[in-house]
Image (cartoon, rainbow, N blue to C red):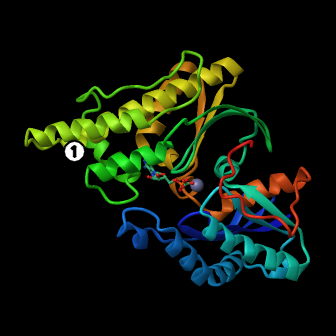
């Protein structure tokens, strides 16, 4: 089965062709980051306009790169939510037009499920069940993946998403948007134990996350230095902040794996690109005999191929949408 997949939930216009949920024939990603960077974050109206400008060309590029035509496509996969409403609408309208014109099925995909499925593309033999930590710019979830398209939710963020915390702290340190990759790089040269920022574990049995207290602690630390006219050691702040975030994420992931009897932990979403997170997971995994999986950097952040993979597993499980489907900007995971 060949699917043409579209992803426009935020600031990447992406289209790809995926065979049987695992094999990527093309995955064209046009990032708007440079445009939004000037504003310190994604400007929704600009994002929508850029998606409209690019989408037709990117669809054609995806077909060309895959060396297939519209007539070869069996169904369309498209991100239905969560995301920016105007941005999602561009992708969904394009997808509906193609499904209608070609008279083929359309499958609405939850963007968060797409992030999990990026791992199916990267690791051809990976099969459920496994523990999954999803950490992106907008979401943080800890789930037990029971089967393809079947999940049990254990934890979510109560305030900021993991990537959002990285981006806000980076902004306070004067780093460009999105700040996650800059913190990651700086942290390598810094001392993670230089500043004792809080580790927020919440209740003993909770799998939820809370990152806003940590973010406030970093901002307070920077303000106190400023009042004393002192300069922060930026690499140490980055490393200490990152250490706090990672320790909590890794600890909770391993606790869930233990509780559910899983011997594999899969990480997904933009923050899964973080080198510190990958290393900490792998070190702990070696000690506890747990295998760690994550996608390559390009598949960690938003892309259409992951939507095509999720679309395939929805499709073969009978989860097909119709042309009346609407964008769902506030769609959570397992809502
Ligand atoms: O998954 P994604 O592309 O978009 C959402 O669905 O939200 O994630 C983007 C987020 C941003 O917050 C970005 O700062 C973060 O992922 N990110 C990272 C790294 N690369 C991207 N955070 C930490 N370390 C990284 N290397
Ligand atoms: Zn995403």
Q: Nearer the viewer, residue 103 or 147?
A: 103
Res. 190 in view: no
Q: Label 1, secondary structure: give it.
A: helix
The C terminus sits in image quarter: top right
Above or below for 136 versus 328: above
Q: Is residue 32 left or right of residue 29?
A: left
Mark 1 = which residue?
234
Q: In this view, does 95 lie to the left or right of 121?
A: right
- Give the class, few, some or many, for how many residues have Cα within 10 Å of label 1's Cα (few <14, many ≥20): some
Q: Position of residue 159 (x, y in %)?
A: 51, 39
Q: Is residue 183 left or right of residue 18?
A: left
Splitting the image into 4 quarters, where does residue 65 fall? bottom right
The N terminus sits in image quarter: bottom right
Above or below for 281 versus 100: above
Q: Is residue 48 left or right of residue 104?
A: left
Q: Where is residue 328 in the image (x, y as percent from the top left)?
A: 71, 58
Q: Which residue is drawn at 56% across and 48% down?
A: 269
Above or below for 145 versus 32: above
Q: Position of residue 59 (x, y in %)?
A: 68, 79
Quadrant hosting ligand 2: bottom right
Q: Which residue is drawn at 55% across and 79% down?
A: 49
Res. 136 in view: yes
Q: Which residue is drawn at 59% across and 22% down?
A: 206
Q: Nearer the viewer, residue 255 or 82?
A: 82
């Amino acid at each position: 089965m060949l699917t043409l997949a579209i992803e426009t939930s935020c600031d990447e216009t992406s289209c790809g062709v995926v065979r049987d949920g695992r094999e990527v024939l093309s995955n064209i990603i046009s990032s708007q980051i440079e445009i939004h960077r000037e504003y310190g974050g994604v400007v929704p109206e600009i994002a929508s306009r850029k998606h409209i400008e690019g989408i037709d060309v990117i669809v054609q590029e995806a077909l060309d790169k895959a060396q297939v035509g519209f007539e070869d496509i069996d169904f369309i996969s498209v991100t239905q939510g969560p995301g920016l409403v105007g941005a999602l609408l561009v992708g969904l309208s394009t997808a509906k037009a193609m499904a209608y014109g070609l008279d083929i099925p359309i499958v609405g995909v939850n963007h968060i499920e797409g992030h999990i499925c990026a791992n199916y593309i990267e690791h051809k033999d990976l099969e459920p069940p496994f523990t999954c930590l999803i950490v992106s710019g907008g979401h943080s979830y800890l789930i037990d993946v029971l089967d393809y398209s079947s999940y049990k939710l254990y934890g979510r963020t109560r305030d900021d998403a993991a990537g959002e915390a990285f981006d806000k702290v980076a902004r306070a340190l004067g780093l460009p948007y999105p700040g996650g990759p800059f913190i990651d790089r700086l942290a390598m040269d810094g001392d993670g134990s230089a500043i004792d920022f809080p580790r927020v574990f919440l209740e003993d049995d909770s799998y939820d996350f809370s990152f806003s207290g940590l973010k406030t602690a970093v901002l307070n630390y920077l303000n106190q230095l400023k009042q004393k006219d002192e300069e922060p050691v930026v690499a140490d702040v980055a490393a200490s902040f990152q250490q706090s975030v990672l320790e909590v994420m890794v600890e909770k992931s391993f606790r869930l794996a233990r509780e559910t009897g899983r011997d594999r932990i899969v990480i997904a979403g933009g923050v899964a690109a973080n080198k510190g997170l990958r290393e900490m997971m792998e070190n702990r995994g070696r000690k506890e005999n747990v295998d760690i999986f994550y996608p390559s950097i390009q598949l960690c952040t938003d892309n259409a191929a992951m939507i095509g993979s999720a679309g395939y597993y929805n499709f073969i499980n009978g989860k097909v949408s119709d042309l009346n489907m609407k964008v769902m900007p506030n769609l959570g995971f397992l809502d």
